[in-house]
Image: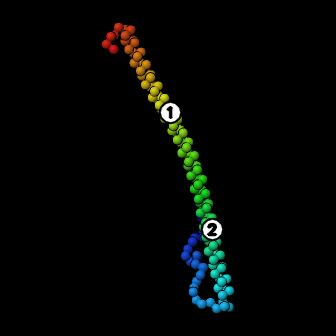
Amino acid sequence: MSDLKLTNEKMRTFDGHEKVGVFKAGEKLTDFGEKQNSANEVLAANINDLIVRVCALEDKQLQNAEVMRKLAEELAAFKKELDRLRLSDKLNTNAVERLNRAVSLAQGDTDS
């Protein structure tokens, strides 16, 4: 960030309302112009710093959005795999129960 901090003093370009004679008008106008140029330089430096900071924030936001997209894809894949495993577990449990009943029936156990 710029070392040029905005202050009221730096932004003050007009110092008074005293009457200015014809011969002093040029000098006062030059003084005002120099102060205005200095104020403009400070403003420009601060605006340029803000532009750099906003661009950096926009880049960071894009990076974060990309990371969140990848996380969402991984989470969806994880959920799909978890659902597949749950189904496999249920099917395997049912198959084991059927086999167990078949073995029991084959052994003559009619209580099962």
Residue located at (61% from left, 57% from top): 55
- The single residue placed furthest to the left in the displayed view is 111
Q: Is residue 91 above or below residue 61?
A: above
Q: Amino acid at mark 1?
A: Lys
Q: Looking at the rendering, which quadrant does residue 8 occupy?
A: bottom right
Q: Amino acid at mark 2?
A: Ala
**Mark 2 crowdedness (10 Å alpha carbons): few <14, some 14-19, many ≥20:** some
Residue 2's tag is none
Q: Is residue 9 left or right of residue 105?
A: right
User: Is residue 96 or residue 30 the one in the foreground?
Assistant: 30
Q: Is residue 41 above or below residue 59?
A: below
Residue 80's tag is 1
User: Is residue 29 or residue 103 the one in the foreground?
Assistant: 29
Q: Where in the figure is residue 9, as x and y percent of width and height?
A: 56, 77
Residue located at (62% from left, 74% from top): 39
Residue located at (56% from left, 52% from top): 61
Location of the N terminus (image quadrant) = bottom right
**Mark 1 crowdedness (10 Å alpha carbons): few <14, some 14-19, many ≥20:** few
Residue position marked by numbered label 2 in the rendering: 45
Task: Residue 39: tell me if it is visible.
Answer: yes
